Amino acid sequence: MGKTIAEKILSEHSHTDAKAGQIVVADVDFVMVNDVTGPPAFRKYDEINNGKMYKERMVLIPDHYVPNKDIASAEQAKEMRDFVRKHDLPNYFEVGKSGVCHQLMVEEGFAAPGRLIVGADSHTCTYGGINALSTGIGSTEAAAAFATGRLWFKVPETIKVVVKGHFKPYVGGKDLIIKIITDIGVDGANYKAFEFHGDIQNIPVADRLAVSNMAIEAGGKAGIFPCDDLTREYIKDKVRGEYTPVEADPDAVYCRTLEYNLDELESMVAFPHLPSNGHVVKETDVKIDQAYLGSCTNGRIEDMRVAAEIVKGRKVHPDVRFLVVPASQRVYRQMVEEGLMQIFLDAGAFISGPTCGACLGGYMGILAAGERSVSSTNRNFIGRMGDKSSEVYLAGPAVVAASAIAGKIVTPDQLEGQ
């Protein structure tokens, strides 16, 4: 009986014949923590006190409240710096050299095909976009990985997703994953992995990362794409060390199969208060107060280019705040070099340095009572970005940019004359 990608990676890392449903103890390639989840992990590591630390496998990235917004967040950041200095840890990315943790894990070459990566953040599943098995864990588990280099895993069943065709203009990975979550629900993939097949060559890697990022919004443990020429090109100047791509066996067993025709996929928007509440944008009529472009889902340079193309020569609607937040310093620099920064500034957008900020309701874009935001982020739960009576609508970068101009949620081709 053949194996899925998840089964193969967990077999390799556990040195067993891992099959769905089994419990295995596996070596992790990297464990990541951020400024929020790191401090509890540091304290728990000190409690373990086994005299061991897998320093080269540890990655520490402050991103949720950077720059620090108050004394509490400053203390969190200081605790991370103190831990780094105490243990002389090599993989720490300070503010000014950093970005959103999941963007950094790819940019800095920790994520790669065939690797098993865990992170104390639920959207660690992002790296499945480049053929890794990556998944979120808790701070206590992160501490255990610091001390042992290993963790236990239940081998997930896998949902096979077959895609055919090409995306229409301004439709992309965000629309695909909103459609999938809408079809199966926020619990439709509980403790399962998604594995993508078909015309994968028609999905750019940036879009794959966005799809994998939101696997958790359907309850998934991972969302894994195969490694192809696009993958290798995307990581060739980034990846650290050697890597071994993994592909599923032809006779692998799947618990379910989903099929999507990309030629027919429309721009989607997820209404409050669940990512599964998806609607076709052109069938909606929603006025907005804020448009937010950024996050670990859609803060990459490819997203910024799409948005800049749409807003170039136009002005942000007078009733809308358009917030543009690149996912890393590298993306920020590329925006400057490519002239995208000037386009956004000329349109009337506010641009910040990389931070998670408003995505988690932290700061720099909090919504007041009754306000609505269209956002390229990944969650729209009650109170996610501000007051409990505010509303968050999830969409791709093209729709976010077009909506900032129109003052309501629209697709780019609905902007004619504006």
Image (cartoon, grey):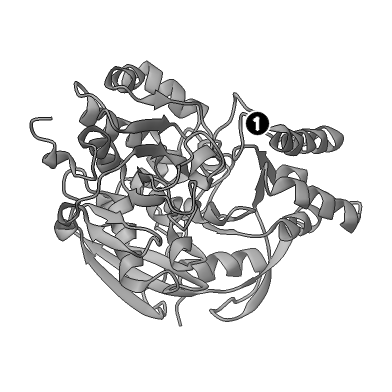
Depth check: 154 or 271 in front? 271
Q: Residues within 10 Å of mark 1 (few under 14, many from 20)?
A: some
Determine the residue located farthest toward the front in the rendered image. 369
Q: Residue 108 lies in what quarter of the image?
A: top right
Can you give x and y, in whole percent of width and height, for residue 212 in the image? 43, 56
Q: In the displayed structure, does residue 219 sit left or right of residue 263? A: right
Q: 392 or 60, which lies in front? A: 392
- 350 left or right, relative to 406: right
Q: Which residue does the numbered mark 1 point to in the structure image?
A: 68
Above-or-below relation of 244 to 289 = below
Q: Amino acid at mark 1?
A: Asn
Q: Is residue 359 above or below residue 99?
A: below
Name the residue at the left extreme: 417
Residue closer to the observer: 262 or 348: 348
Residue 238 position, x and y percent, is 51, 35
Quarter in which the C terminus is drawn: top left
Question: How many marks on residues?
Answer: 1
- Is 226 drawn above or below residue 296 in the view shown? below
Kindly tell me whether residue 104 is visible in this rendering.
Answer: yes
Residue in view at x 48 percent, y 67 percent: 220
Please identify the quarter of the rendering in which residue 27 is found. bottom right
Is any part of residue 208 visible from this angle? Answer: no
Taking the spot 52% from the left edge, 73% from the top edge, the residue there is 191
Q: Which image quadrant is residue 277 in?
A: bottom left
